[in-house]
Amino acid sequence: MVSIQSIPSTPSSLTHIDLQWIVKHREDRCTLCGKCTSVCPREAIYLTYRRQRMPKLDILRKQRGSEYRTFTGVRQRMAKANRCIGCGMCASVCPNEAIAPVPNGNDARVRMMQNEKGEAATRGGRRNVRYSLLDKVMFNRISMLTDPALDAGRHEFELNTLLGRVLAPDEYLRRKLAGEWIPPVREIFPFVIGSMSFGALSPNMWLGLLQGVAYCNEVLGIPVVMATGEGGCPPWVLKSPYLKYIILQIASGYFGWDEIIRAIPEMQCEPAAIEIKYGQGAKPGDGGLLMWFKVSKLIARLRGVPEGVDLPSPPVHQTLYSIEESVMKMIQSLSMAWGFKVPVYPKISASTSAKAVLNNLVRNPYASALLIDGVDGGTGAAYNVSMDATGHPIASCLRDCYLDLAKQGKQNEIPIFAAGGVGKNGNVTQNGMALIMMGASGVHIGKYIMQSAAGCLGSERNRCNVCNIGICPKGITSQNPKLYRRLDPDKVAERVADTFMAIRTEMKKIMAPLGRSQSLPIGMSDAIGIEDADAAKRLNIKYIC
Amino acid sequence: MCRLALKTASEAFSPYEVLTAMEAMQEGYDGSGLGLLLRGISFVDYKYRNSDPILSGIAHTEGALHRLHDFMQARGYQLKYDHEFDVNASLVEAQDRHKYFVRVYGTPDSVKALSQEELEAQYMHTRLDLRQDGLDNDADLTVFSFWPDVVTIKEVGWPLDVGNALGLSDGRVKARVVMAQGRQNTNYGINLYACHPFFIQGIATMTNGENTAFVPIKEYLTGMHHPGYIGYQSDSEVFAHILHYVTKQLKLPIEAYKHVITPLRTEELNVHPQGDFLRGLRNACRRFIIDGPNCVIGTMPDETCIMVQDGKKMRPGTIGGKPGEWAMASEMCGVDAMIPDRDRSLDFQPMRENMIIVSPDRKEFKIWSQFSPFPLHQAA
């Protein structure tokens, strides 16, 4: 053993087996084309010449010796900025399957080093927990002999939901008779593309989504809407007839709203709705964050800020003194901006205080809905600790809120939309319908649509999850043209249509055996069960085993 | 699946006639219970005045009957007539039926002085209080209806046997409208409150098939905290309460019931002359959309009879008859049994958008379509 000083080791020294992903390279297959190193968004690997000793034994002379051969190998970088993220782009471009990252079966020590210069770990993605309670929900009120199950392939199904405040029947009649204002209501597909900002997403991704959404509406007859995150909307979209498929979000940074307000006189149609973000599930109590890497010229123009600066939104709205005031000022003034013809609703993080917010909204005649985002929601950028450990799962929060509304007989008036972890393990329709049967009027999907429509590689095993620094290997969340040109908007649009067609079919396959086809089974809690007695009790649904 | 039969005629007839229709529809049916609702009552033994309320139910013990008597007396209701059925107890499966009561009461002056709405509320509360009294006393008292000109009978067993057990064939009680529902899969342990027809403030419905949207509808009705919106031992009780809500609470014409439980689709409403109003109504009443498969047959206090299907129309009902006499049934042979001498070519099975309405004059049945203009001036 030698003294420590003679080996280059520091407290933060790492070797490849300390990293979360280990790049396996097979020299016998490598053609030295160099594609892997050039595609790697992290520059995590580099080709390097190596020397290998070849033992040489001369038996006749009874001599031992060494020869050396030089070969080209791949070496992994250890620096924080260059750590392999397991995206696998190297493997996807390798002509010879010579290289791939594999998850480290060992304990990755890298997490302990992610505080260099006192900066705590940040990332994109969502809570790195693969478990999903929603996956355990089963639909078990099957129509058997007493009422026939329906034919999902041939029967007609009403799958749409309502976004907007629905008046109580007597109040509706009174206002209709008196010629008074009736709150705007949109009939939409219950799976909504959740808020991902123009800024968080690349221009190609955004364009692809919008094209796909337009196709779903205009060709397939699936009235899908998508929500912008904070950060506005390109002016050409604001002035286009496609605006009606878009929910515009206003958040605590108010980014992009100069452009939106200026465009109002030239709008051809109204937006689907306005979403006021008070919180999001991935990082409750935290504002939006667009890191400087992604503030390109275009983004800077849309947001009215200089290029290349971090854009952290405050955790609360400047106008927020109290919930009453916030609701009064923001919901009312945004309703007023569009002549009370556009639904305006808040988005909050799931929390034990959600019921208080909901009850306040019930009393506000201009509040159109409530979107609750659970702890498994994704984000473009947040502190790891916020994502992993802060928040509240969506199921019990939604259920509490719905049952509270039902007790007051208000469940039809304020639709609750649920988000956060829908489709986490790919079961998007099952997860969404489970939430709908617990009382949601619809669900928002963000991460799932990135995965399904654009091939997002992020996972809850901390694969990739670098949306925050603009190096998305697929070009989904990058503002770097070299990266986002990897994404073909037309193909994204095609995948969006594929995704929603499949969701539509799966919805029918869930509803048909339940004998439901005439309306979305919102709150049909007798149809679901769960193999978890505690969860069943908490959610007030059946325990099955 | 349950069997439904309704007959309405200008001349009062014996409810036993409708039970024979049950018999005709027996194929593939286990006939394990019967619910009968009669309107337009006449008793052979008593000259009935149709504004007097009639209390119908079952006292399971002598004590319950005494309590009932005291209860009504304390409220000032004077017993005018107590109909005695000629009961043949051996034909009744259940053993705890002390007395089937159908009692006509004289309304106290204090109640007579109430407005129509208050009077109706008073009748309903009286029924609900008695029902609660029974539930508080080991379910020894079951009360089905307390309303002028309405008699309700419910019992477990083969429908014709129940009719024979109560001697309904003797013609001592007759009615202009009889609704009968033959139950399926019932046993004597069933809660009699789960039996159709369901009744609230003069409105009654009966249904076959399952109501797959039951839980959300029930939760919505319960959340309204209307004192009469209780029970729900059967998933079909909500149909009666929705009809009550639409006509009594919202005060909409009866056609609105169809628009509420099976609204037209968006693309259909877009071309409907009152599409804007109806779309709003559909949204506001979204929680009342039924999902069947059901045939719903209902009657109103003025003896109007209706029949509707759920949107899937998987439980087609049939109406047939002749002026002055109409029959509705869940199976065609039921109509045959009730009114054999009719022109069968004029029988009709309502489609998903239709509502059959037989008005009290009984001259014809109206096939109303949701695609037709909605008969509400305020909507236009």
Image (cartoon, rainbow, N blue to C red):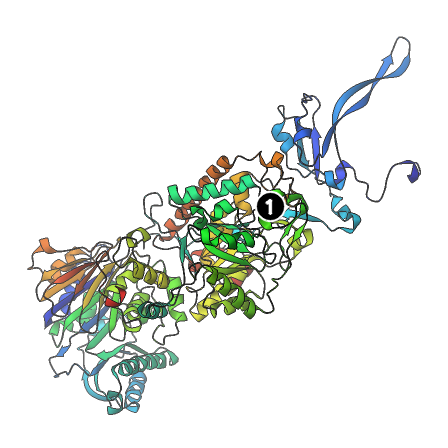
Q: Quadrant of the N terminus of chain A?
A: top right
Where is residue B124 drawn, in percent x and y? 30, 79
Vertical placement of residue A448 versus B324, above or below? above
Q: Is residue B158 visible?
A: no
Q: Is residue A71 left or right of residue B52?
A: right
User: B209 or A178: nearer the eye?
Assistant: A178
Where is residue B378 drawn, in percent x and y? 26, 67
Vertical placement of residue B173 versus A305, above or below? below
User: A153 or A315: nearer the eye?
Assistant: A315
Task: Please tell me which residue is depicted at 45% across the width and 49% down the height of the picture.
Answer: A243
Question: Which chain is mark 1 on?
Answer: A
Badge 1: how crowded within 10 Å, few (<14), some, or many (20+)? many
Q: Amino acid at mark 1?
A: Ile
The residue where tag 1 is placed is A299
Residue A162 picture quarter: bottom left
User: A448 or A510: nearer the eye?
Assistant: A448
Where is residue B53 drawn, in percent x and y? 22, 82
Q: Is residue A500 left or right of residue B87?
A: right
Vertical placement of residue A296 versus A252, above or below? above
Q: Is residue A5 visible?
A: yes
